[in-house]
Amino acid sequence: MADAIFASDSSKNYSILIDLIKLEDKQGPFFALNDFEKSFDQDLHKESIEFFNQHPDLIKKIQADLDDQPIQWRLKNISHRLMYVPETREEYTAIFERYCNDVVKDILRLTESNNPYITIHTLGASKPENSATKGIDAFIVHNLGKEYVATYVFSNKDQKEIAIELTGKIFLGEVGSYSSYISLNENGSFEFTRDHFTIWQNSAKNPYTALITPVEETLHIILRQYTERSIQDRIENSAVKTLKEVEAIVEDWISVEEAIVGGLVYALLPSTVEKYIPDLPDSLVESDIKTKIEFKKYRHLRKGIKIVEQLGYKKSIKMYQDDPMTFRNLLM
């Protein structure tokens, strides 16, 4: 059963955003958003492996320095931090900020949710200060990436070792970010922490992807506590003891959260966005879905869209709030 969606009265037209989003895609300069933190990152590790694969001469030199013996390698540590390219177009900054505030208000009203944000604003060249309150800052940037430092240790059978440090920057390939983290305490318990900010990128190949980002990340914020509760329950009711085993549980539940968020976006956004952008091409919506499902964490997206269509967005949200496992079982 579908829910009725009533668009609020609005004479605002943000159609100009379609062209502004596509107009420019700056690759720099980068500025640091936060400090370096040590934690494993699969994408950055893959980037490092790709570097070694593309530089066979470096591997030959390492092997020669290790007495031409067979070599082994291991990742010693990897540190990374978020980097961003600021938006410098004043007209675009003002229009996109207004759009974000309007569309977030609509979604909060439709989902009957409290406003989690302290501010929604565009970042300049200065690193933002950490918020002292319990709310969340929404930072709008032009482009988003990561800077990393990774140390790999190569060794031979005589225990001779060579350490290689790699540094680099990569673009994330995602236009939104709201992260929570799980850590293993000394007593064996696990603890969740969350960022006090979310990041929205205002550039994308598909303008619709940038236009829905404020809503996607807002829905993640609204639902994250229920996802974390399910992760915690599954850990406590299983025999997992290592961080690697926990990460597998986290990955599974993040794919479930992405499915319900994607379903809610599909149910709520086209009509909401069309209120502000009447001439939005329908092809952009389907293109966004096709792009997302190429990534593993969106593997349940189409099923999530179907479930939310069948249940209605209000019932879907209540189900996830009451018992996320029930929604997960519908996906599997």
Image (spheres, rainbow, N blue to C red):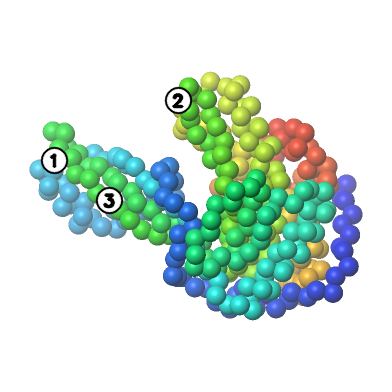
Give the vertical position of 93 relative to 107 (above or below). below
Q: Of tags 2 and 3, which is closer to the observer? A: 2
Badge 2 marks a residue whose secondary structure is loop
Residue 226 in the image: x percent, y percent? 69, 37
User: What numbered label is drawn on residue 19?
Assistant: none
Residue 39 in the image: x percent, y percent? 43, 42
Q: Residue drawn at (30%, 46%), measured in percent from left and top?
A: 151
Query: Of 26 and 256, which appears nearest the observer?
Result: 26
Task: Count neighbours of disc 3 (C-alpha within 10 A) and say few if under 14, some if 14 to 19, many if 20 or more.
Answer: few
Query: Of 99 and 54, which appears nearest the observer?
Result: 99
> Are discs 1 and 2 less than 8 Å apart at CB?
no
Query: Of 252 and 134, which appears nearest the observer?
Result: 134
Task: Count neighbours of disc 1 (C-alpha within 10 A) and say few if under 14, some if 14 to 19, many if 20 or more.
Answer: few
Q: For mark 2, what is the residue?
A: 186
Query: Of 152 and 80, which appears nearest the observer?
Result: 80
Q: Residue drawn at (61%, 32%), measured in percent from left and top?
A: 231
Q: Earlier in the sequence, mark 2 or mark 3?
A: 3
User: What numbered label is drawn on residue 165?
Assistant: 3
The amino acid pointed to by label 1 is: Gln
| Count of marks overlaid on the render | 3
Q: Is residue 118 visible?
A: yes
Q: Residue drawn at (20%, 57%), measured in percent from left and top?
A: 57
Q: Residue extending furthest front?
A: 132
Q: For mark 1, what is the residue?
A: 69
Locate residue 301 relative to residue 82 in the image: left or right.
right
Q: Earlier in the sequence, mark 1 or mark 2?
A: 1
Q: Residue extending furthest left?
A: 67
The amino acid pointed to by label 3 is: Glu
